[in-house]
């Protein structure tokens, strides 16, 4: 099942590659396709979570030692989309985009988690900045943040997380 799934996704992506062959390498095209699909899913889940699941309301988690715990809807929607797109992103990058990496899976996963931690921090900072300081609508803030984080993520994944040894 696993091999069939990877082969099917790879075949579908590669089917659309020929018109782009002169402009970008296959690996970059696969990254754009996988990352683009995962990013679109991320933004869709964020939008649904923010607007309909959370209904644009602060999520109150109760109180601990007299302090009320609450998460703003734009940050909670980010968390909700993340728990789905994190494992999917690792799967796609490991098995389709950077399948030729000679690093062990656990090393890749550890490095991917480090990258994701950095991306989480960047997402948090930029969403908070755009929404709370610049008064940008949360979904638009998420899209702007995504553009910044995706560029950072691709370069880091190619050169660190899934790199090939210099053989």
Image (spheres, rainbow, N blue to C red):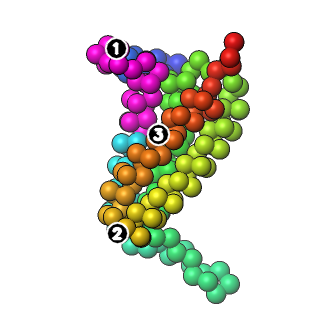
Q: Residue at x 46, y 58 (%)?
A: 126
Q: Is residue 116 left or right of residue 110?
A: left
Among numbered discs 2 and 1, the one appearing first in the sequence: 1
Contact between labelled residues 3 and 1, with CB atoms less than 8 Å apart:
no
Give the percent coordinates (x, y) of residue 117.
61, 49
Quarter of the figure with residue 110: top right
Q: Is residue 9 visible?
A: no
Question: What span is colored magenta in the figure?
Answer: 16-38
Give the percent coordinates (x, y) of residue 40.
36, 42
Examine the structure image and report whether residue 19 is included in the region drawn in magenta. Answer: yes
In whole angstroms, how far apart are the C-alphas of marks 2 and 3? Answer: 24 Å
Q: What crowding class fits label 3: few (fewer than 14 Cα within 10 Å), some (14-19), or many (20 or more)?
A: few
Q: Secondary structure at mark 2?
A: loop
Q: Residue at x 40, y 42 (%)?
A: 39
Q: Is residue 13 above or below residue 41?
A: above
- In depth, the one of 43 and 48 nearer the eye is 43
Q: Is residue 79 above or below residue 9?
A: below
Q: Which residue is mark 3?
A: 151
Q: Which residue is mark 1?
A: 22
């Amino acid at each position: 099942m696993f091999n069939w799934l990877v082969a099917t996704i790879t075949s579908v992506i590669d089917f659309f590659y020929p018109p782009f062959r002169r402009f970008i390498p296959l690996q970059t095209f696969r990254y754009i396709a996988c990352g683009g699909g995962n990013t679109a899913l991320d933004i869709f889940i964020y939008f649904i979570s923010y607007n309909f699941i959370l209904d644009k309301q602060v999520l109150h988690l109760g109180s601990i030692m007299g302090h009320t715990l609450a998460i703003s809807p734009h940050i909670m929607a980010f968390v909700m989309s993340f728990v789905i797109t994190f494992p999917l992103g690792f799967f796609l990058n490991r098995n389709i985009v950077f399948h030729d990496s000679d690093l062990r899976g656990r090393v890749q996963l550890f490095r991917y988690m480090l990258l994701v931690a950095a991306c989480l921090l960047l997402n948090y900072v930029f969403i908070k900045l755009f929404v709370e300081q610049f008064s940008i609508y949360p979904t638009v803030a998420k899209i702007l943040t995504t553009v910044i984080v995706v560029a950072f993520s691709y370069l880091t994944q190619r050169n660190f997380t899934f790199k090939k040894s210099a053989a």
